[in-house]
Image (spheres, rainbow, N blue to C red):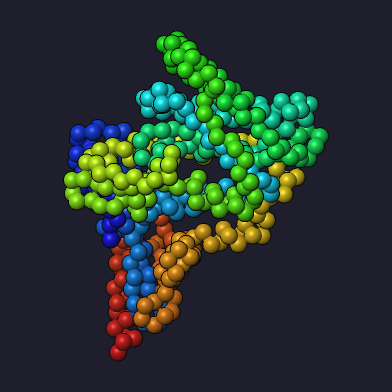
Amino acid sequence: MSNILQTIFFDYYEHLQYELHPRQTVMENVSKMIHCGDPSYGGAMFACPDCGELKFSPFRCKSRFCPTCGNMYNLQRSFAMSCKLVSCVHRHCVFTIPEELRIYFLRDRSLLNCLFHSVRDVVLRMFYKMNKSENFTPGLICVLHTFGRDLKWNPHIHALITEGGAGNFTVWRTVKHFEYTFLRNAFRKVLLERLEKKIGKSFRKVKYEMYKNHTEGFYVRAKPNLCDPNTTIKYISRYLGRPVIATSRIDKYDGDFVTFHYTRHEDDKTVTECIPAIDFIKRLIVHIPEKHFKMLRYYGIYAKHHKQEKKLHKCISSEKKRYLRSLMNWRHSILLSFGYDPLKCPKCGKYDTFQSKGDTDSPLSLSHPPTRTPHRTAMVVLRRWHLRFRAASFRWSG
């Protein structure tokens, strides 16, 4: 059964391809999303060892743009972030840019790296100023969002920063005060300098206008929010890992127009928009990142193989991490989300077994089903298993 996003993009696929002429990565992600769960693209066959009941499970596309696969990706990403968290209070900060600069990041998406690097340099510099000999290093997790609630292009960085840092001589120092004025002015300066270096002299006029029009720096939200470790983990999974739009926000699609709603930041009022389907598609595809572009990055003590990493107490212990990782497979995810076991036989209540698509007759692990379209030879083997279990089911029923 297709979801509403698949229906919209399927109906307007040719318009998208021949009228909008999108980037190659857009067509790849849209094509994957449209065919996600299509049985003609292959799947896995399960069979009940008692009654012979067969169940075919189609392969998924694994695209982050797909609402189904994107939710699973975000769940895995949130779990990876939670495993890195140090057991301390974290502060959620948002680094935004003026509307006049957004067009530059849309024209050249490589400039989005400047956003990450600017936030990293500013935060590390703020902690370095506290004690230059200690050089306190915080933990910093940055997530890039290119969308606002109205789905328009609005690149900004959500940063989760530890309220404290590890020093050269001190294991940990708690920091309650963030220099709000420094963050705003330093972020403006560092970002504009990087953009001028990347774009060239033609950006100088824009740079001077930014200093003139934004005398207090670029807007940075860095208010204390008292995120203890447990609250931080819940916050990460609910907010930082969210997709561009949830299918629950799409109220209606009649073939020509799409109606969706969102909550406005300024007054927390629910706003409903009804726009042509092709305009709705334009708003969505602009947020598909380039292939291999990292939307999530770790800095400071959260960077890979940091020297202070093993000395700090983590939110999730190693034993709990192993247990939670065992629940991240597809079977347990469906069981926890929807309350039913996908491998439980509807007839006899026994558990289905997955049969190998290779040349061996040994069953594969239930926790790791195949994730790509099978080879033609494997499809023949699947067909052979299908016929074998059909014959077995007739014998068992008799």
Q: Nearer the viewer, residue 61 or 135?
A: 135
Relative height, residue 202 to residue 67 (above, below): above
Res 331 visible: no
Where does the C terminus fall, quadrant-wise?
A: bottom left
Instruction: Count how many numbered circles sit on residues in the image.
Output: 0
Give residue 59's position: percent from left, percent from top. 35, 57
Residue in view at x 66 percent, y 60 percent: 319
Residue in view at x 59 percent, y 35 percent: 222
Res 205 visible: yes
Where does the N terminus fall, quadrant-wise?
A: bottom left
Give residue 148's position: percent from left, percent from top. 40, 38
Give residue 352's position: percent from left, percent from top. 42, 74
Image quadrant assignment for residue 382 = bottom left
Q: Nearer the viewer, residue 65 or 391?
A: 65
Residue in view at x 59 percent, y 49 percent: 232
Image quadrant assignment for residue 385 = bottom left
* Left or right, residue 146 beside residue 282: right
Residue in view at x 22 percent, y 41 percent: 276
Relative height, residue 108 to residue 225 (above, below): above
View extreme (bottom): residue: 398
Give residue 37's position: percent from left, percent from top. 32, 57
Relative height, residue 182 to residue 303 (above, below): above
Relative height, residue 359 to residue 181 (above, below): below
Image quadrant assignment for residue 171 = top right
* Left or right, residue 231 beside residue 280: right
